Structures are given as C-alpha cells and as structure tokens.
Image: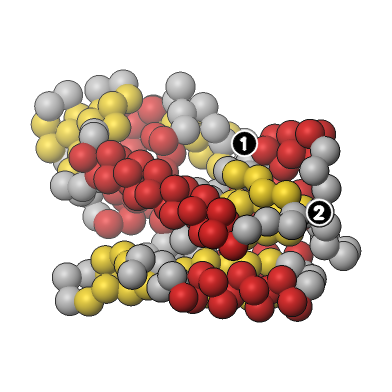
Amino acid sequence: MPQKIRGAQHQEKLRVLVVDDEDDLLELVRYNLTKEGYAVECVGSGEEALVAARREPPDLIVLDLMLPAVDGLEVCRRLKSDSRTRDVPIVMLTAKSEERDMIMGLDRGADDYIAKPFSPRVLTARIKALLRRGEARRREELETPLEIHELSIHAGRHEVKLAGVSLDLTYTEFALLQFLAKRPGWAYTRSQIVDAVKGEDYPVTERSVDVQVAGLRKKLGDHGHYIETVRGVGYRMRS
C-alpha cells in the first residue's frame, strides 16, 4: 500500500486529487486508485481544484484539460506558480490527442500526459512512477547540502554553515533562508514567503517577514547582503 511517513509514530496514505467534470470518469479513477491504496479526493471543476490543492496540497494531481470556466491548463499554471503547490506532480488528462495540446500542458508545468480513453492500469503505473521520482528527489534534497556563496544548507540535518561555521537559526529563519536559496535571483513577495515558511509552531505574518529577514541578516553578519530587498516586491537571494 502506498504510504508516506508522518512523524515517527504512524504512516499515512499518499493523497491524490482527481479533477474532472465527468462523474463516471471520476468514479472509475477513484475506484482504481483507492484499490491501489491511495487516499483519493475528487472534484468537478478548476475552481474546486485550486481550493482543494491550496487547502491541503496532495501528493499528486490528476487533472483534466477540458474543464468549464477555469480549464486544466490555467489550473496547472496557477498551481505551478504557487509556492505551496508548485512541487506537486500533475498528470493531465484530455480527450484531445493532438501534439499541441500535450505541449501546452507540459509547457505549463504538467509532469505527464495521458489521452482519453486510457487504461486505469496505465494511469496507475504513471502515478506510481511520478511518486517514486518525487520521493527520490525529496530524499536527495534531504541528503545533499544546498551550496550557495559561502553558505551550506542541509535540509535533512536542519543545519546551516557559513564559511564552515554553524549558524544557530530558528525554524522560521532556516525555512526562509532555504526557500530563497533554492532559487537565487528570484524575487518573492512577502505573501509568497509566508506561504512557504509558515509552520505549525511558528506563525508568520506578512509584516513579521521583515522582522525575520532582519534577524537572519544579523546572524549572517557581513554576508547579510546576500538577502536582497526588492522594492515594491519583497526579497530574493543574491544570484
């Protein structure tokens, strides 16, 4: 049964969000994925998909291209541009089999593409493959330090070294630094930073982002200029 670790005490099923406006297809996919051991949530519109994915990001999304109002391409674009959901793999479904539709989906960040009609076994196999790749990527991130400038950020150890010297950072400071360091040169709004670094025990507001950045810069000392202020936007890690 597909499972992920949630702390040291118990395991939880991997969650899949399925988005399609055809009830029969939703039931077919729900039945087959549930049988494989996944926890499945089904919604029938792009608007519902955005709400569900942002409320509690799933482990994977199966997304139909042809949806009323907000179509699958737009849903995919919004999810991949949102710091909360950009790393969630997306499998796009469509009745169209033209190459241009596939390219459009992949260009907007979709991770795989299956044309209708499809075999549930093929869909399940693609989902398993994507989740395996995602898990391998996460493990690599935990085990491999992120190196930038004189900084070494080790997610698995929750450790930051500056020129070989360990820094004593809070949970929020660590998450903020890691978030900015993953994409040097990219500017993020305070709202995006809040979404990325907020934790259960460390509530963060947009206004307190400035306080957290100030504290982090102080701990970085002479290297505090690595975190740059972008006027009218927010902050970025110097590239």
Residue farthest along the left direction in this orientation: 165
Residue under the point 79% across and 71% down: 21
* Type of amino acid under label 2: Ala
Cβ–Cβ below 8 Å for labels 1 and 2? no
Residue under the point 83% across and 48% down: 96
Q: Is residue 39 left or right of residue 9?
A: right
Question: How many discs appear?
Answer: 2
- Spot occupied by residue 84 in the image (x, y as percentages of width and height): 52, 56
Mark 2 crowdedness (10 Å alpha carbons): few <14, some 14-19, many ≥20: few
In the displayed structure, 222 sits above or below 200; it is above
Give the mark nearer the N terminus: 1 vs 2.
2
Q: Secondary structure at mark 2?
A: loop
| Residue on which disc 1 sits | 231
| Residue on which disc 2 sits | 95
Foreground pick, 88 / 96: 96
Q: Is residue 61 left or right of residue 205?
A: right
Foreground pick, 144 / 137: 137
- Spot occupied by residue 26 in the image (x, y as percentages of width and height): 68, 73
- Spot occupied by residue 220 in the image (x, y as percentages of width and height): 26, 34
Q: Is residue 230 left or right of residue 69?
A: left
* Type of amino acid under label 1: Arg
Foreground pick, 72 / 130: 130
Residue under the point 47% across and 33% down: 183
Q: Which mark is residue 68?
A: none
Q: Quadrant of residue 105?
A: top right
Q: Secondary structure at mark 1?
A: loop
Foreground pick, 182 / 121: 121
Residue under the point 88% across and 64% down: 69
Q: Is residue 86 left or right of residue 3?
A: right
Q: Quadrant of residue 123?
A: bottom right
- Spot occupied by residue 169 in the image (x, y as percentages of width and height): 22, 49
